[in-house]
Image (cartoon, rainbow, N blue to C red):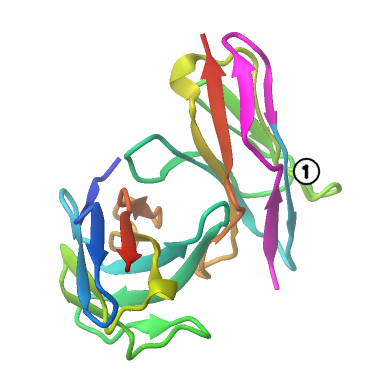
Amino acid sequence: GAVVSQHPSWVICKSGTSVKIECRSLDFQATTMFWYRQFPKQSLMLMATSNEGSKATYEQGVEKDKFLINHASLTLSTLTVTSAHPEDSSFYICSGTGAMGFLGSEQFFGPGTRLTVL
Amino acid sequence: GDSVTQMEGPVTLSEEAFLTINCTYTATGYPSLFWYVQYPGEGLQLLLKATKADDKGSNKGFEATYRKETTSFHLEKGSVQVSDSAVYFCALKKGAQKLVFGQGTRLTINP
């Protein structure tokens, strides 16, 4: 299957600072990328969906001004957690899909980024 | 709304044991059903899927049958290996809508 990477895999930051997480599709062009959040022993919760070159669509209850998503190219999406607070500590996972008909509509997932806000 | 419920983990088995991880769903319409696996340090990978009632998905010795009458999609494997140790997620999806995941089940296989 296709490969998606995330960087960093683990980050610790101070409360009030901003953190950027990168998600890259390494061997395919991801026309759509998804960002998920996972709390311990809970399922993945979709935060937002972004199409390349368009503004992200956020799920209900997700603050778009706090979780800034950029999908400027077909191989890179970034999630910036602005003014992070301890309650933002979580495991963030991205995934991507190719154009319809290419790789089907299967989502390919990154390995996740663990964010800890002190 | 639509939801997926998996058996609580962690599940610990000995090598060559029979595995069942239960998954039930609540959804209107006719969702497609999926099992994803996440090995340590890696992203979720699609393990198998079924798109309509009575379909059986299979891969790497794992199987799951789409049972509409019981709204279930239980994952089974006849003889597990240490390399099957991972977290397993059941999920559903309707058309172009988003994937809805269960909470995941951590499986540990001891030699």
How many marks the image carries: the answer is 1
In this rendering, position of residue B36 left or right of residue B67:
left
Residue in view at x 41 percent, y 87 percent: A63
Q: Which residue is mark 1?
A: B67
Residue in view at x 36 percent, y 67 percent: A34
Residue A13 in magenta stretch: no
Q: Crowding near pointer 1: few (<14 within 10 Å), some, many (20+)?
A: some
Q: What's under tag 1, amino acid-wise? A: Arg
Front residue of B10/B29: it is: B10
Numbered range of the magenta stretch: B1-20
Quarter occupied by the C terminus of chain A: bottom left
Judge whether A40 appears above or below A19 on screen: above
Judge whether A80 appears above or below A54 on screen: above
In this rendering, position of residue A50 left or right of residue A26:
right
Is residue A96 in view?
Answer: no
Quarter occupied by the N terminus of chain A: top left
Q: Quadrant of residue B29?
A: bottom right
Q: Quadrant of residue A113?
A: bottom left
In this rendering, position of residue A104 left or right of residue A29:
right
Residue in view at x 79 percent, y 50 percent: B71
Indicate the secondary structure of the residue bearing disc 1. Answer: loop
Is residue B67 in view?
Answer: yes
Give x and y (percent) for residue B41.
32, 39
Front residue of B40/A90: it is: A90
Residue in view at x 57 percent, y 16 percent: B80
